[in-house]
Image (cartoon, coloured by chain):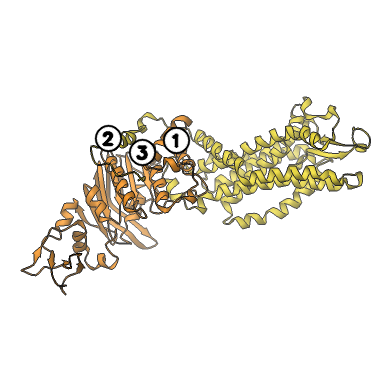
Amino acid sequence: MSATPVAPPGHPRAAHAADMLIGQGRGDLSPSHPLLVAGRLGRLEGRRALTSTAAVFVVVVAFVAWVLSREGASSEDDWWFAVLLDSMALLVGLGALLLLNLAATRERRNRAGELLDAAPGAPTARISGVLVSALVPATAMLLLTIVLGPLAALVTGFDVGDPEVSPLRGDGPVGLLILGRHAELVLLGGTLGVALGMWVPRLWVAVLAIPPLFVLGIWTGMWGQGGDHAWLAPNANQLSIRSAHDYACEVDRLCVQFEQPLGQFTSYGHLIYVAGLCGIFAALALLRRSRSWRVLLFGGLSLAASLGMGLALVG
Amino acid sequence: MSLSVHVDELTVRLGRSPVLSGVTLSAGAGITGLLGPNGAGKTTLLRVLATVLAPDAGRVRLLGRDPAVASDRLEIRRRLGYFPQEPGLYRSFTAFEFVDYVAILKELTDTRARHDEVRRVLDVVGLRDRAHKRIRTLSGGMNRRVALAQALLGDPSLLVLDEPTVGLDPEQRLRFRETVSQLGANRVVLLSTHQTEDVAALCSFVHVMDGGRIVFAGTPKDLALRAAGCVWLADERHPAARLSMRLPDGRYRHVGAAPADAETVSPSVEDGYLMLLGERALGTGVAA
């Protein structure tokens, strides 16, 4: 079916085509576990998400906005920084929501269900693949955040904040959670995007969810910078630019500062809470194609983890 | 696993209307063609055979297994290649990515072996040089080649092809015939097509469907013989002929009840199909 002429029977190229058709027989291949299938799909989907124009756009815009925010930097404008930085973090989360929503609805948009349903990989494996794919951009965000602070300091000429509060200095989960703020948002936004994609018929309906989430994110972000309920905010941990007089930087200079409103216990609690939320969204997505006891158990455990941790932390 | 397909008294309803009524069919290794006018139930039958549609009644055995049983269905799907009538492809993927995606769903999880297999099937359909083009930038014919490539993944024992030659140019169709003719040697291939030439060239057996039933089962030669003595040449158009076609030499080729003194010629599969289905075949064109 290429531009080359059709080979008549007996022609060497016809024989070559026949050899190619023999290929790798199914008899040589052992069945793979569904989780392995989901993992491989996740890797493929994650790679696509990471290299998509939208993802690159979100990261570039977020970084440029962050660097440019120094222009208005002064102590009285701090709250603007907070809003701007939270917006950038949310932009990452919302970008993940949209990207994974598009991935989850791709099968429906392209009417590919019939073709894919004839394959041994179950529909839940396809949904799981998209869910698992969120780990790829989340990991990328974690790595990006690790280099972002020193890079921003280099670009802006700011001091890096008090080295004693650096998350790279071995605070264990506390430090990792500070760096993992954007990764958290990618996981939450991504899994929510998949859940919306499975249950909401059109993308524009999912888009309607964005403004309230945005406002809620800003609010919980501000709220999450302190107080008893900081663990509730997905973006409770901060990588921000603050004026020197508030923090341990050189006087009259700005510094890149990692903030951590959570303690050791609340960090673990926050981690379980966020993982539970992701699990709830994932179970909601899977329930679209499967009511199996495994999915119900997974959803139930996720719900229990989130609620239980919430009650423990509030108590 | 036996290389056979058996369907017994199959019934599928859409709402209350039956789309398939008591269809009985058997096919072994080789290429079995499926012809019939639009709405005859061919696609519904192939969807049942591709395990994506459950019948309302009747028994189905595919490769010696029962698709109604979940474990059997999984085993069948492991040895099935399916080309649906409207193959939805992921248009934002490249041809390689999409076939790779389906290969993962077909449980080819070892990356190196899978990529080799993807390259192999893209080679078979002649798309290797376009493997990294996005599907939305490929022509309709190339899109169908991508769909055929994914169906060939894993060397399936049962290949269900629903009108795969639609949109292919003559050369592509010839290449398709070359490819499929080799596939039929060691597997069951069920082929629904609009092209009676494809049936004549490829199929060892053909079923004709009409109104949700099988109305003919036999070899393409048997089907052609349905029009034996009913195809003739004449200098003038004959008013009693079902179909008259003016040939390049100015004479007319007629199909229908031939007059006693007619100069009859050998019928084609198309003629036999026309005689079998009569006005229904003409009403939709000679279509599968």
Q: Secondary structure at mark 3?
A: loop
Name the quadrant of the C terminus of chain B. Answer: bottom left
Identify which amino acid the numbered label 2 is placed on.
Pro
> What chain does badge 2 belong to?
A
Q: Colour of chain A?
A: yellow
Do discs 1 and 2 belong to a common subunit? no
Name the mark on residue A12: 2
| Location of residue B15 in the rendering, given as x and y in whole percent from the top left corner | 40, 62
The residue nearer to you, when weighing B271 against B207, is B271
Residue B27 in percent (x, y) is at 25, 45
Q: CA distance from mark 2 to mark 3?
A: 29 Å
Q: Which residue is mark 1?
A: B107
Question: Which residue of the protein is positioned furthest toward the front in this rendering?
Answer: B249
How far across and down, in percent of the image, does residue B193 sit? 30, 54
Question: Relative to A29, does residue B15 appear above or below in the rendering?
Answer: below
Determine whether label 1 and label 2 are within 8 Å by CB: no
Position of residue B138 relative to residue A263, above or below, is below
Q: Chain of mark 3?
A: B
Residue type at tag 3: Arg
Q: Which residue is mark 3?
A: B79
Instruction: Name which quarter of the figure residue A246 lies in.
Output: top right
Q: Is residue B234 left or right of residue A225?
A: left
Q: Residue at x 73, y 35 (%)?
A: A145
The orange one among the chains is B
Q: Residues within 10 Å of mark 3 (few under 14, many from 20)?
A: many
Disc 3/disc 1 C-alpha distance (Å): 11 Å
Q: Is residue A142 visible?
A: yes
- Residue A303 in view, yes or no: no
Q: Type of residue at label 1?
A: Glu
How far, Cα to Cα, is label 1 from label 2? 33 Å
